[in-house]
Amino acid sequence: MNKNILNEINRYREIMGLPLLNEKKDKINKYSWDEGGSGNVNLGNDDVTAGNLSIANNIGSANLSLFYGSFQPTVQPVSKTETKVITMPSFTLVGGKLNYNDNCVLPIVNVGEAKEEFDKIVNSLVNYINNGGFEKIESITIQGSADSGKPSTSGNDHVEAGYNSPFNGETDLYKMNQFLADERAKKYGLLVSNTVKEATGKDISSKYKYLKGENFYGQSNPEGGRVGERKIDFIVNAPELKVADKVETSSTITPVDENHKSTTIVIIKPDGTTTEKQGIQFITQSGASSKNRVQGFYPNDESLSEIVEIPTGVVEGEIVNNMLRLNGKDICSFYSNKQHTENNPSYTCKVTGHRGVERDGIILVKDYFFNLKRPINDEI
């Protein structure tokens, strides 16, 4: 709307006691998702690199905005190969590392030392598996333990955990204590395997071997206090993993062909994994002290079929299971970034994409990033 016309309309609305029109607010509302998970996304017609352009807002109950930008994709550096050794440690969870409410079987792993230990287990397994170690894991032995304290049906979570009734109907105190020793270990193992599967796609529960839990019920301590302790042993039987680790090395820059030159481009896929493709690099601008290199593929290159095409203009967007979709196509997966806190959520997703426009006979690709966060001062 012409600014002079808007000012004139607002002058009369002010005289009549009506609220003023805000061109910027109208523009924002046009791309509001109304606290939902879908709505319009304004990608415009131009590529951006700053990353501070808001393309949708009022997303979800946290009232987040979506920002995006782009930059040159990574090209594999000159490197040497070294061997790194990955070991898979075993874990004994006791004391603060193992957090259960009395008589409960569902572990609490989102706070304190228990969270730190849970994250250690999951991260160790994810690192081992992502480096090709899944098939090398021979077994994971899990054994729980319940101290001599008297079990009670008070405040238990057994029905919530999937059992038909508290202690699955058992009323004998010794057997009730055995239930706690066994089922706590199983529920902890299930939580670990589900979390690892989300990160790697691999189900480690097929490697599990549960041992009968240690049961100290009925035992007495002459010095007073309970006998035994709440404990879970999480023993991973897996060999050292030796993998080739590419280490970037410094090298002297030498004159390069200013025309098309074959190069290895690292492609970020919508699910967050990466792959390498042989593409083309060429110089678009050359000065005395710097060269502007761009990467891409010839139009008939089969690799383009595996690379996301980023749309332009106003498109339909939605976020489903952490996946950003534009016009019904999967674009990239969100993950919590370094700025993320519980009170100020912030997520990022990255993908290598193209827009089908040729330059010097090449379809250029870029790494596009989308940030989901609260806008500064509620502005876009």
Image: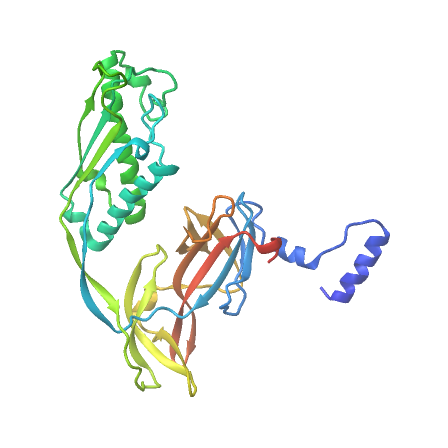
> In the picture, which quadrant includes the N terminus?
bottom right
On screen, residue 48 above or below 379: below
Please give the name of the residue rendered at 46% of the width and 50% of the height, measured from the top-left corner: 340
| Residue 165 appears in view | no
Locate residue 277: give its quadrant.
bottom left
Q: Examine the rendering and report whether any part of residue 205 can be seen.
A: yes
Please tell me whether residue 232 is drawn above or below residue 199 in the rendered image.
above
Q: Nearer the viewer, residue 336 or 149?
A: 149
Task: Please state the total of marks drawn on the protein image.
Answer: 0
Which quadrant of the structure image shows residue 117?
top left
Q: Is residue 316 found left or right of 158 in the rendered image?
A: right
Q: Nearer the viewer, residue 117 or 377?
A: 117
Question: Residue at the spot x=36%, y=32% of the render?
Answer: 108
Q: How is the image coloured?
A: rainbow
Residue 130 location in percent, x, y? 24, 53
Q: Position of residue 107 (x, y in %)?
A: 33, 31
Q: Is residue 87 left or right of residue 278?
A: left
